[in-house]
Image (cartoon, helix red, strand yellow):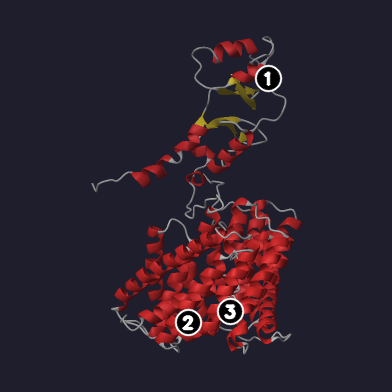
Amino acid sequence: MRTTKRDYSVDQRLLLLAALALLIGVISTLAANLLLKLIHLFTNLFFFQTFSLLDRSPASNGMGVWAILMPVAGGLLVGLLARYGSEKIRGHGIPEAMEAILFGKSKMSARIALLKPLSSGIVIGSGGPFGAEGPIIMTGGSLGSLVGQYLHLTAAERKVLLVSGACAGMTAIFGTPVAALLLAVELLLFELKPRSLLPVALACAMAGFLRPWLFEAGPLFPLTTAPVTAIAFGSCVVAGLLSGALAGLLTVALYKTEDCFEKLPLHWMWWPAIGGLIVGIGGYLEPRALGVGYDVIGDLLHNRLALSVALALLSVKAVIWVAALGSGTSGGVLAPLLMLGAGLGIVLSPVLPGGSPGLWALVCMAAVLGSVLGAPLTAIVFAFGLTHDSEAMLPLMLTTAVACGVTALAMKRSIMTEKIARRGLHIHREYSVDPLERQHVADVMTHLPVTVDGALTVAAALHQYYGRQASHRAYPVVQDGRLLGLLTQERLQGQAAYKSCAELFSDAPHALLPGASARSAAGRMAQLGVSRLAVIDSELSMKLIGIVTVRDLLQASRKDLHEETVRERLR
């Protein structure tokens, strides 16, 4: 017998979401280009006092000790924007997007779409030690959300467009569409459905195709490492353990710093300026620690920095990044984590056999990123997308897996979810196929339930079905082979004794079809506030074939619980 059950719960709305995702891919790519131009503009204004879009590093400024004041000025401006514009521009973008998706019905305001790139351009342009990826994720996400709100889409559909915009923006910045798609899966979507995955993939692909027209083509950090030897297995394990430890240390340091700012007897508006002072002092000591630092990442991957120089630079970078982000300013985490991870690899390279210094910089870069974010697949593919180094894939997998195992065991939450947890909201990062999605109503329903004839009087029904020997709380009422509704004792109370049971039902009954999933049945019960529903053959015939209760639905989870908790011997 042929079945009508489907692998995926999709409908024609997928076509609409796909078309909108392509449009959002274009918009987010343009927004990413605008954000980079804003960073260049403010870098030239703050450090070179020129109105220019030329890409210049703040490290080459000739301001001397006056350069210390530039991050302070930038922090002050962003504090004012956050205070009088929108407080949601504070932070590094991804946690705010996650919170909007899970707790805010994927609604983001037009104010965020405007102020986030502006504030990030000011912060990074004034020397803030951040990358552009966090701000563009927030900006692209808000643009996608606005499109969804304008078209009156559902919250689930808005989420798809929000994530499409966020990941398209990341693709435009880094040129890594596959890693951006995995970021959606591991951090933003909280589901794996064609309804969400396919539009996001289309948005990332669109951004990837457009990127060469607006940005430099090719990988951001092209790298070729030699094939590894067997002894590299042990080196990868060591590198993974230390990368996980560094990731945990950075996470703890960030939120300890945030706690310190919380204790200041000043309004949070002033905190970014205080963080900016620390950035300015650090940048005066190590100018290359200022700004995005892509050039530094490239030098680390190609082993162009002496060990002592790299140590000094990365120590300052870590301190000013933690201080600035802990102050609540606007900035990203990916680029600083890439730099710090690569620096760890350079430090370890003299003592790790089996690979070149560039290899250890690359694998530690991915491992630190993956373990801080709690997104190992994203980190592995991201590192490959940035370098196109296929020889490093196996060490990348091993090192990142070990590092993520360390933080999963040692840390309760990641750097992303800790910020949300501090607002009293908890995110459970694991997800799997719901046992209720694997079961259908026909699998769990009670067949041939006891029914009540519609012609039966109220008095007779009370006596026959709700006496001392009552076995059920509700019974389907059937007349002429059609379901009329579910009869409860409460519905019978206060009715005239001579009235027929059929007369108690005037509206169309709530019922389920046998092909519906157990999950949809549970949702329907929750929506109606009932604990059981009748099952009919079709909406045309209204023929009763069964009944489903909450208890029936709970049985669907018994197998999963058994597999998770019962340990069995080999027979």
Vertical comparison of 166 with 396: above or below: above
Mark 2 or mark 1: which comes first in sequence? 2
Q: Which residue in the protein does label 3 denote?
A: 291
Q: Quadrant of residue 302?
A: bottom left
Pointer 3 local density, CA inside 10 Å: few below 14, some 14–19, many at least 20: many
Residue 201, x across and y down, in percent:
60, 66
Vertical comparison of 526 with 83: above or below: above
Q: Quadrant of residue 265?
A: bottom right
Q: Which residue in the protein does label 1 denote?
A: 502
Looking at numbered disc 3 in the image, what kind of residue is underneath it?
Answer: Gly
Between 473 and 335, the one nearer to me in the picture: 335
Task: Tell me whether the residue at label 2 lies in contact with that at label 1, contact meaning CB atoms closer than 8 angstroms.
Answer: no
Decide if residue 551 is on the left or right side of residue 490: left
Looking at numbered disc 2 in the image, what kind of residue is underneath it?
Answer: Leu
Residue at 40% x, 82% y is 346
Q: Which residue in the protein does label 2 denote?
A: 313
Mark 2 or mark 3: which comes first in sequence? 3
Residue 207, x across and y down, in percent:
64, 73
Residue 561, x across and y down, in percent:
40, 43
Looking at numbered disc 1 in the image, what kind of residue is underneath it?
Answer: Ala
